[in-house]
Amino acid sequence: MESKITQAEIGKRVSILRKNKDLSQEELAVRIGISRSSLTQMELGKRNLSALEMHVLSIELGFSIDDFLGSELNISTYEDSAKDLTETKKVRVSVPKLDVEKFKNVLLYILERCAGKPNVGETLVYKLLYFSDFNYYELHEEHLTGAIYRKLPFGPVPKNLDSILNGMIDQRELKRIKTQYHDYPQTRYIPLKKADLTLLKASEKDVLDKVIDQFSDWSAKALSEYSHQDIPWLASKEGKEINYELVFYREAPYSVRNYLDEF
């Protein structure tokens, strides 16, 4: 049977009917045998449904496939909150919990890899940490450092960062220096010890290397502006925590996961 409606409309209907059943994305994804991120892409109209998935959905959400695919289906009685990216009800599957030692070693590794690059000051380091953590979560649906980021005027910044940095300086693991870069004041961090790579999985190091290769030559201004167009940043409120789950709403060029291969 050919669908009379668009892929985007199918996704919208799935989202509305799921919420009408009071199901989280995680709960429905488990029931139909796909990942939560794949269901997110489906609801956004970026992933097709297989015949088997449509059949299971019809059972779980209680609809007739003929009616569902028909252009006459009346869904106006359902509350359409499909575009509410900040929905938190039952969404969070893995609450971030900061692993201080891993965070410190990720920071040391980034600083080692960027040694000698005069553009890599404090602002750029914060962005490299952010993209490392959020890209890893999109790819693997688990946390890299577990750092909690807040939306601040100059970009996403990990909470409790000052206390971690000051502690590393006191332990002579880092040195903070003030410099000038293109006539602007800049704060830089110099690693005084090597990162312990035994604390990093191969998949974690791979994401770190890709982020560093992609962004470490950017200016702080350019990377800040780029980060401000990332969906997790855009969908968050000023001064509030940035929800990791929002990475599944990313589009190119920010998304790092190939959902078509997964399908």
Image (cartoon, rainbow, N blue to C red):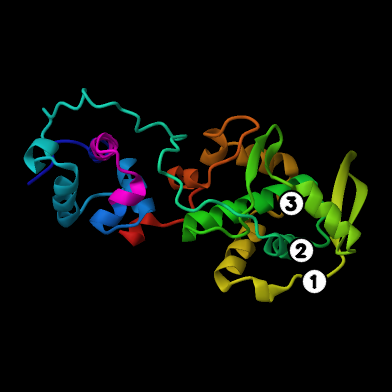
Disc 3 crowd, CA 10 A, few/some/many (<14, 14-19, 20+): many
Q: Amino acid at mark 3?
A: Val
Q: Amino acid at mark 1?
A: Lys
Residue 139 is at least partly visible in this image: yes
Disc 1 crowd, CA 10 A, few/some/many (<14, 14-19, 20+): few
Q: Quadrant of residue 201?
A: bottom right
What residue is disc 3 on? 125
**Which of the labelled discs sits on residue 108, or is there none?**
2
Q: Secondary structure at mark 2?
A: helix
What residue is disc 1 on? 194
Where is residue 40? Give x, y as percent. Answer: 36, 46
Residue depicted at 70% across the width and 59% down the height: 100
First along the sequence among labels 1 and 2: 2
Q: Amino acid at mark 2?
A: Leu
Task: Look at the image and say whether residue 49 sits in the magenta stretch.
Answer: no
Task: Look at the image and say whether residue 25 sits in the magenta stretch.
Answer: yes
Callout 1 touching callout 2 (CB < 8 Å): yes
Residue nearest the viewer, comparing 117 with 41: 41
First along the sequence among labels 1 and 3: 3
Residue nearest the viewer, comparing 214 with 12: 12
Q: Quadrant of residue 16?
A: top left
Q: What's the magenta region?
A: 11-28
Residue depicted at 28% across the width and 49% down the height: 28
Residue nearest the viewer, comparing 92 with 203: 92
Residue 121 is at least partly visible in this image: no
Residue depicted at 14% across the width and 46% down the height: 58
- Tell me which secondary structure the magenta stretch mostly adopts: helix
Residue depicted at 36% across the width and 52% down the height: 36
Q: Quadrant of residue 209?
A: bottom right
Nearer the observer: mark 2 or 3; the answer is: 2
First along the sequence among labels 2 and 3: 2
